[in-house]
C-alpha cells in the first residue's frame, strides 16, 4: 500500500510541476490574460443578447452570431496557447511513467478488493507475473492518479473553473 501512496504523491508533485510550467509558459503571459478577459466579455455579451433576443430581430441575431463567432475564435486561440504546455505535460508524464516503470517493474503496488472485469485486467495487471488479477500494477494506479490529480490541482490553483456551475464559481471568487 505504501508503494501506491508513493505513486500518488509523485503524481501530485508531478501535477504541481506541470501546472507551474504551464503558469510560466502560458497563464502569466499578457496575451493569454487578454484573451481570457476578451472571452469573458464576449460570453457575457452573448448571454445578454440571448436573454434580450425574445423578439427575434434579424439585426440582433446577426450581431449575436458575430459575437458567437468571435467567442469561438477566442476559444481556439486560448487552446492554441495552451497547446505548448500540453506538449510539455505529455513529455513529463511519459518520462515519469518510464521512470516509475523501471522502479516498479513486475511489482504489485496495490491489491484490489475485487476482481476487475476481464476487459480491465489488461490495465490493472499490466506487467505483473502470476494469475491473481486482484494484484494491481503501477501503470493503473499512475493512470488513475494522473487523470484525477491534474484536474484537481488546476482547480486548486485557480487555473480552471469546474465544468459544472461556472457562473457560481466565478461569483464565489469575486466574493
Image: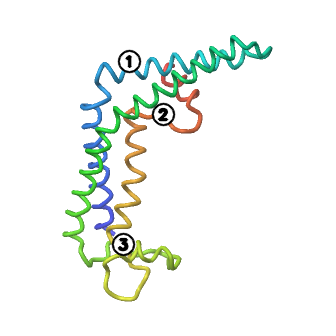
Residue at the image point whose x is 36% and y is 21% from the top? 33
Element under disc 1: helix
Residue marked by disc 3: 110
Q: Residue furthest bottom?
A: 131
Any mark on residue 101, and which?
none
* Crowding at mark 3 (Cα within 10 Å: few <14, some 14-19, many 20+): some
Marks 3 and 2, how far apart at CA: 32 Å
* Crowding at mark 2 (Cα within 10 Å: few <14, some 14-19, many 20+): some
Taking the image as shown, residue 62 lies to the left or right of residue 7, namely right
Taking the image as shown, residue 90 lies to the left or right of residue 46, namely left
Marks 3 and 1, how far apart at CA: 46 Å
Residue marked by disc 2: 161
Mark 2 and mark 1 residues within 8 Å of each other at the beta carbon: no
Rendering coords of residue 160 (x, y %): 43, 34
Mark found first going from the N terminus, 3 or 1: 1
Residue marked by disc 1: 34
> Image quarter for residue 135?
bottom left
Residue at the image point whose x is 50% and y is 20% from the top? 40
Mark found first going from the N terminus, 2 or 1: 1
Marks 2 and 1, how far apart at CA: 17 Å
Q: Nearer the viewer, mark 3 or mark 2?
A: 2
Element under disc 2: loop
Mark found first going from the N terminus, 3 or 2: 3
Element under disc 3: strand
Amino acid at each position: 500500500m505504501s508503494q501506491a501512496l508513493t505513486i500518488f504523491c509523485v503524481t501530485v508533485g508531478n501535477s504541481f510541476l506541470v501546472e507551474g510550467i504551464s503558469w510560466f509558459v502560458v497563464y502569466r503571459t499578457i496575451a493569454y490574460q487578454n484573451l481570457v478577459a476578451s472571452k469573458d466579455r464576449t460570453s457575457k455579451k452573448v448571454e445578454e443578447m440571448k436573454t434580450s433576443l425574445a423578439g427575434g430581430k434579424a439585426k440582433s441575431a446577426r450581431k449575436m452570431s458575430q459575437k458567437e463567432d468571435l467567442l469561438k475564435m477566442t476559444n481556439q486561440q486560448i487552446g492554441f496557447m495552451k497547446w505548448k504546455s500540453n506538449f510539455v505535460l505529455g513529455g513529463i508524464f511519459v518520462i515519469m511513467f518510464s521512470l516509475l516503470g523501471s522502479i516498479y517493474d513486475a511489482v504489485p503496488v496495490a491489491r484490489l478488493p475485487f476482481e476487475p472485469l476481464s476487459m480491465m485486467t489488461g490495465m490493472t495487471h499490466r506487467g505483473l507475473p502470476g494469475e491473481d488479477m486482484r494484484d494491481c500494477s503501477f501503470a493503473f494506479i499512475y493512470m488513475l492518479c494522473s487523470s484525477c490529480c491534474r484536474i484537481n490541482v488546476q482547480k486548486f490553483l485557480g487555473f480552471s473553473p469546474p465544468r459544472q456551475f461556472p457562473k457560481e464559481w466565478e461569483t464565489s471568487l469575486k466574493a
